[in-house]
Amino acid sequence: MNIIVPVKLVPDLVEELTVDAGGTALDTAWLRLIINEFDDHAIEQAILLKERTGAHVTVVSTNFEGIDDLLYTAAAKGADRLIKLNGDFESGINNHALARALATIIRDLKPDLILTGVQAHNDLDGSIGPLLAEYLGMPYIGYVSGANVSGEKVIVRKEYPAGLIGEMQAILPVLLGIQAAEQPPRYVAISKVRLMMKTMNIEEMDLGALDSTGAPIVNRMFQPEAAERAMMLSENADEAASQLVTIFKELGTL
Amino acid sequence: MVITEITHTPSFSEIFLTSLYKGENGERFRTCLQCGSCSGVCPFGYLMDYPPGRMIAGLRADEFDLVMDTDTVWMCVSCYACAQICPSKIPITAGLMTRTKEELLLAGNVPSELQSALENSQRYGNPMGESPRKRADWTIGIQPQVTILGKDRHPVDILWFVGDYPSYHPRVQAVAKSLAKILNVLGIDFGILGPEENSDGDTQRLAGERGLFEMLAEKNGRTFSKYQFNKIITSDPHAFNALKNEYPALGISYPVQHYTQFLAEYLNQLKPMLIKELSANVTYHDPCYLGRVNGVFDEPRMLLEAIPGLKLVEMAHNHASSLCCGGGGGGMWLDGFQWEKAHVRLSEWRVHEAVAAGANVLAVACPYEPPRFEDAIKMTQQAGQLVVKDIVELLAEALG
Amino acid sequence: MNQDIFVAIEHLRGKVSDISYIMLAATRVLAQGTGGKVVAIVLGHEAQDLARNFNADQVLYADHPLLSDFIPEAYQKILAGIIDEYKPRAVFFGHTTIGMDIVGGISAQLGLPLVSSVRTIETDRKLVSQICGGKIMAECELPEPTALITLVPGGYKPELGQSPQSPPITAISTQMLDGLRIKLNQYIEPETSDVDISKEPLLIAVGRGIQNQDNISLAEDLAQALGGVVCASRPVVDQGWLPISRLVGKSGSTVKPKIFLALGISGAPEHVEAITGSDVIIAVNTDPAAPIFNIAKYGTTVDLFDLVPALTEQVKQTKG
């Protein structure tokens, strides 16, 4: 079985995010990129499926800063093939453009199953999974937190609110939007990643021309005003506790 | 007659044992007497499925794969008590416990709390996952301004390697500020690396991540070589140990002192400045990596005794027999895991000892300790009014 | 050009979800701007009764046995057909496990523009989206010809999407739904737990800041002292430190307590959307820039490990 995992790098929220001088995009000067958390789960789920079924796992991503490390780490976890996509996306790339370009490349990889994160926090034109699925002519199920392949089918657990699960099945090939892998992404020792740097090869491919039709045009980007910001209590623990007791009394709790 | 050669495939135990012999002083593993002193002195030995002595027995009995199935080696806090007491001078901590943790890490058997600390160290250069850009934020407001070498590119006499916890942890930032104050009153020409400083990596090394340690050391080494200074001092015994004993093997070698050693040399100048009396019974906790591992016992005490009114009392375990606070070897990032197994914390035992010694103040010299001991005090009813202060905080208070 | 605004109503096991009403409320605002009607689309099987009390001008109802439960492929196909036929000015979808499964495919299939994570509509038909964990807002013009919009909760109260009257229902025929590759096998209920947090009036929520399972007892002690219940955000439940029945947020429960005390929670949208119905949110977070302070009524940067024991103590003393 051939599993493809498209992954993305997104702005690391640990750093401060600011809007650039143009006012319509993030300032990239201090921006650091980190793997999209949900894509990390997609890699984990793919490796779990590989361990169960002996599948072949390909991880593919656009060439942004930090991508090599991400790919070698995936290899250290068990990914078999690493692909880096080059193209002109200095100012970012939206999901419609990426999905169209990825579809062309992934079609040639003849996937049976595609796993990708169900969303990324910087998505503005929907998430990539459903777009990619449609361009590839595959059915899509998102918010998946467990998957098992059985012959020509994949059986998935789709998450609904309040802990409810919808168990669905789909005939391969299918694209799944992963919410959570069946276990948290595993740790891989740095020495293993360094080994991969020496032994694994990252293939490079060209992304081709980008067509952003379907994505919105941003008028302006801004940081939310702290409208109606909380009334801040004391910075001293005992005083703050005392203030809270007063508040609880006012609210009728105490 | 045909004689077929029987090829012997080495077992996991054999491979592992052979690798241990190749480590520094590794041949001494052959001389283990199975006396049990290591397992006996180990603070969590009673909880481990395979305390150190039994691990060695397991290796000899070709049963080490059983050890790999357990997770109790993560109870090891790398306190060196075992290595220190071993009559055969076997390097148990670094040579066996750390190596076992390495194997477990490679196999993916690592508690999740520790996993995030390791991933954060790799990504952000500190185990807390804080932005590297904020590493020198603790210096904001200090007058005179602390020299950050990346910005003020001039040579300094002393490079102060601050460390993760003093840089980011709110409680320990107070310790950093106190040391800055003391260095300033002494007129020391010093600078810090600020955002260019990465975790020293020593605790991560002892937690089994050799690759991560080397990566962090290499980064620090490159940064050191950019600047001019005569000596490195540090507020962190773990960084002290790394810089003194581990970095040279990677080609990074500078004179280094723990701040207690450095300040002790300035005692004649410092003592007359300590004018405010501190009448309290103060007991000093010898940090594992300053005391037991690196033999620095006297200088911290000299500094404390220079404070007027201060009475130094010793706990039952002191100097080389000091009880670990539980933060080493990854313990700092395994609190939940270790609590589940032990339902007791080493830091709480130590607080009991401080109370029993009649102390009002528990003096420390390692950045892990203020938060660890203060948490333990909250959990220990008899601790009463015991407070935790780093030596340098007491010195700063005594300046008046 | 048709200026009507359509809403893809979401329902699960016989109940219309809150996001549907929030969408109807948002649609009203947008429709004022375009001058069109508000049209709710309901897909289901023998489910006309669901289309009650919508604040809408019209309901289009499509019935088919394969639409009785949500199947992404089926809903996408039918909705794409409806949108292609009626060509409204805009269509709202929920930014949910239902809406997000289908809107992308419709955008790709019909070549229509898609704006996601929208929180509010400005009167001049601008869409304001919330991204990057709530730290960044992005404003876009309503794209042409038919804008597909996914709406996150928090911008409008569901009550504004409800009406005492029910709008007229028009039954529409559906195309064939054969050859589907996705099938729903069954629903799996979560393990029954001791509490239903969506019904609790006082919740104490723990987030990543609680650091480990053992510290949850601090929150439990406070909960016990105050007469409340402990719940958690995703990271805590993912680690297995609390059962999924205690999860507040997407894939968990939406809660409407009188008091929501958030301990060590940053306020990321997927968590926050589930608590905006709370009367009073009190946030405890050492980061003064944490987004949670923008929706909390009271806040403090005191470390929760200092505050919670102190508060528990004082509450116990007050209760005597």
Image (tube, rainbow, N blue to C red):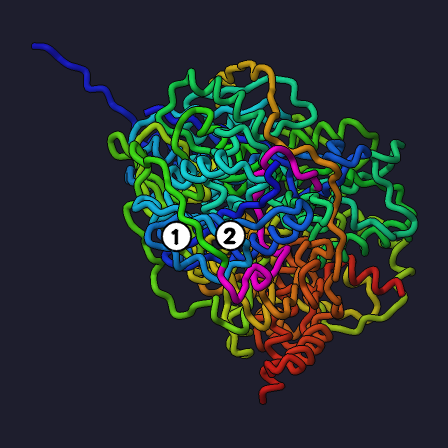
In the rendered structure, find residue B36 and report the number of the disc placed on it. 1
Task: In the rendered view, tell whether residue C263 sits above or below residue B356.
Answer: above
Residue B19 lies left or right of residue C226; in this view the side is left
Crowdedness near tag 2: few (<14), some (14–19) or many (≥20) residues, C-alpha within 10 Å? some
Label 2 and label 1: CA atoms lie apart by: 83 Å
* Image location (x, y in percent) of residue A138: 39, 28
- Identified by mark 1, the residue type is Gly
Q: Residue at x 79, y 27 (%)?
A: B226
Q: Is residue B177 left or right of residue C75?
A: right
Q: Quadrant of the C terminus of chain C?
A: bottom right
**The one of B26 and B252 positioned closer to us in this rendering:** B252
Disc 2 residue type (three-letter) = Gln
Which residue sits at x=58%, y=87%?
Answer: C319
Residue found at the very far bottom of the displayed protein: C320
Q: Nearer the viewer, residue B334 or A131?
A: A131
Residue B361, position in %: x, y? 70, 69
Q: Is residue B92 left or right of residue A123?
A: left
Q: How far across and how far down the image is residue B261, in percent?
A: 76, 48
Determine which residue is flagged by label 2. Answer: C58
Q: Residue furthest left?
A: B1
Q: Tell me the quadrant of the picture where the N terminus of chain C can be found.
A: top right
Frontmost residue, A86 versus C319: A86
Residue C270 in magenta stretch? no
Residue range (magenta): C139-166
> Is residue A30 in view?
no
Judged from the image, the secondary structure of the residue bearing numbered disc 1 is: loop
Q: Nearer the viewer, residue C246 or B209?
A: C246
Which one is closest to the eye, mark 2 or mark 1? 2
